[in-house]
Amino acid sequence: MTEHVEATTETTDSGPGGYAAARLRLLQEESQSGPPRRSALAGLTDQWLAALLGGGAETSGIGGGVALVAVGGYGRGELSPRSDLDVVLLHDGSADSSALAALADHVWYPVWDMGLALDHSVRTPDEARKTAAEDLKVQLGLLDARHLAGDADLTAGLRTTVLADWRAQAPKRLPELRELCQERGERHGELQFLLEPDLKEARGGLRDATALRAIAASWLADAPREGLAEARRRLLDTRDALHLATGRATDRLSLQEQDQIAGALDLLDADALLRQVYESARTISYASDVTWREVDRVLRARSVSRPRLRGLLGGRGRGGSGSAQAPAERSPLAEGVVEQDGEVVLARAARPERDPVLPLRAAAAAAQAGLPLSLHAVRRLAAAARPLPVPWPPEAREELVTLLGAGESTVGVWEALEAEGLITRLLPDWERVRCRPQRNPVHRWTVDRHLVETAVRASALSRRVGRPDLLLVAALLHDIGKGWPGDHSVVGETIVRDVATRIGFDRADVSVLATLVRHHLLLVETATRRDLDDPATVRSVAEAVHSPATLELLHALTEADALATGPAAWSAWRGALVADLVKRVAAVLAGEPAPDPDSPQQITAEQERLAIEACRTGGPVLALHARSEALPSADAATEPEPIGVELLIAVPDQPGVLSAAAGVLALHRLTVRAADLRAVELPSELDGADKPEDVLLLSWRVAAEYGSLPQAARLRNDLLRALDGSLDIVARLAEREAAYRKYPRRRGVHAPPPRVTIAPGSSQLATVIEVRAQDIPGLLHRIGRALEAAGLTVRSAHVSTLGANAVDAFYVTDPTGAPLAPMRAAEVAREVEQALR
């Protein structure tokens, strides 16, 4: 590296052009990257700026008393390709202001001419010290001050005073720094879980690593060093590659750049890149948590010791309140585990080398007490604890369940165990899901954190089930198969049989856990995509779960899984559908007779009223109103949850109803969150020659894309026009799509193509066509038109939206009312898929 910098000295002395050429050569050298390149770039820039200061001093006539100082990241010698140059022109106050301004211009303008971002200031040491006292960010930058050129004594004096001030003011400034870090984390999110993270500002990013350096400089506390430098280096390397790929000074790792950046870092793919970023962020986040706890402990101790010291100086005798601070009390929590000073530590008599259950016992005690595990305790356990025998003893299994059932406090304790490698030692299969990203935007967590969050959610539902231990373990392991190729539910079933056996569950319990993992998506997928009035739907679920006890567990696991996924995965509407399905399956498992598929379907009083009016008028009838209801598991005192606006449409059965209704909603910019279509029999008192055979009842849950909801009368008028052909929905939607193309929005993620499949065996009465596609305006209208063009009758439709993805199921028959032949069904699926492309 030194030879490279020396070789470029001649070019940097000749001016900005020489520096630009040398800089470009350095950035294009594939053999040099990472810390050596950042250091070399900083050295190259140092020489250039030093030459600029020297030339400016000659021009302005300032002979001495000035220094050029690098601060912040530049001060640390870490320049990424598009980093800002943070510099201070320091002076002793003796120079004339106009000469000083001329000197500053001589340095600043060439930097701006190069197109480099410059964060600059001109200050005396006293002014810099005063500004630092008023602005925490300035003080943090000055902690990394590094001399570039000029009077080295000025720089040394500034560094000495700034560090002295920081250490003297640390009890006041560190809480301010912590608040700044927390606000930034809340604004930018947690780096270890974001699909498009900000490498610098998000929690666990480069700003937090800098904060840890500042804490260490205060001499009050120090971060755990193991892995911290490597984590920081990886984030800096990723940012370097991001700057080179985009040509911009950006810290946001956008989806469209991730594959290119992964290639630049010699990583397999974008998932490998994200996993490396997440692991680095997790190391920094954990180090931050531990360090801030230590800061709190030291500041608490100081606040207690000072009054005692004052009392001692005031003349109080020995043994009084002014005596030396007593050792922190140790309160027993479990065998070998005590609480001390707000943390869980090992008892003095604990022998982890002789007690293989101690790690789980300590973790369970900490989680139940809502306290963190001390860093020293976790490291001692990791270094000395014996491996558990296989199968685990009952106590170990019970402590694991106790840990999982502690609720929110489980997360912090689990992270402490994971940071020291104890989780993968207990559960080797965990390594496959650790820090694994989930590309589906519905998910807010990585796979491993989602599993822990599901256990947290399940702990709140444990009173609903007879075997809370099986619920909690199933919650922890339900997605364990995502670390392997293939269907994660199928793979997970095999893995969980092995894991549950190792943990010590008997054969019957292992079978239940395997069933829960294999079918953890069964209830929500069936409830939202299948016709619950079809006996085959309920019977298939009953055959999968086998027993009421397993159904009870699966119901709770379904809710916990959805709640831990993200806000788009669970709602009162979905909860009600799942609860309805569970009720029907429970009846079948209890031996109650299955409902007659030919019997009239149950409808509400409002639906019956709308159907009667539609029959009498011969046209569509609408009702539009807001809905809210409590989740099935909610406490009686819980406020009802709004589930959006419900639109009910009753219309005499005729071709094109589904596509017409969906098209009208799209024209009025109504986003369909969920939909249900079914034919209902009319009341017997309406029998007559002019009575239509059926009335179609469409139940929609919609939201306005912009502004307020349209009036029901306008929707009805447009639906009438769409049905009689006077409103050309296809042309109107095409005009809107052309307008979108004319004024393209910000470039987004390229969505995968739609997929249309047949779900065999889902119904004896109809063929079930399942459509998975990007949720776009008019999607349901296009699907309806494609099905109608194929000459099919839609018996019922079940529409579900998860984030940006639509998952819709349509029960269709041929014109005679019979299910489609297999070859015809496959042909229709291809036609619909082609229509959506």
Image: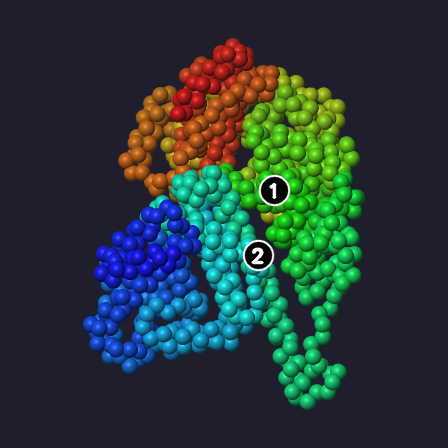
775 with respect to 516 (left or right)? left
Q: Residues within 10 Å of mark 1 (few under 14, many from 20)?
A: some
Q: Residue at x 66, y 18 (%)?
A: 596
Q: Secondary structure at mark 2?
A: loop
Q: Quadrant of the N terminus?
A: bottom left
488 with respect to 54 (left or right)? right
Q: Give the percent coordinates (x, y) of residue 790.
A: 44, 15
User: Where, by quadrant of the figure, is residue 4 drawn?
Assistant: bottom left
Q: Secondary structure at mark 1?
A: helix
Task: Report how far apart the C-alphas of labels 1 and 2 lie in the structure.
Answer: 19 Å
Q: Give the percent coordinates (x, y) of residue 585.
A: 68, 27
Residue type at mark 2 is: Glu
Q: Which mark is first along the chain, 2 or 1? A: 2
Most foreground residue, 401 or 683: 401
Most foreground residue, 127 or 320: 127
On residue 226, which mark appears?
2
Q: Residues within 10 Å of mark 2 (few under 14, many from 20)?
A: few
Residue, far bottom: 315
Q: Residue at x 47, y 34 (%)?
A: 805
Q: Give the percent coordinates (x, y) of residue 609.
A: 54, 28
On the question of residue 116 being in view, the answer is no
On residue 301, which mark appears?
none
Please give the residue where the numbered disc 1 appears in the rendered image.
431
Residue type at mark 1 is: Glu
Residue, far top: 816
Q: Quadrant of the C terminus?
A: top left
Q: Residue at x 50, y 12 (%)?
A: 823
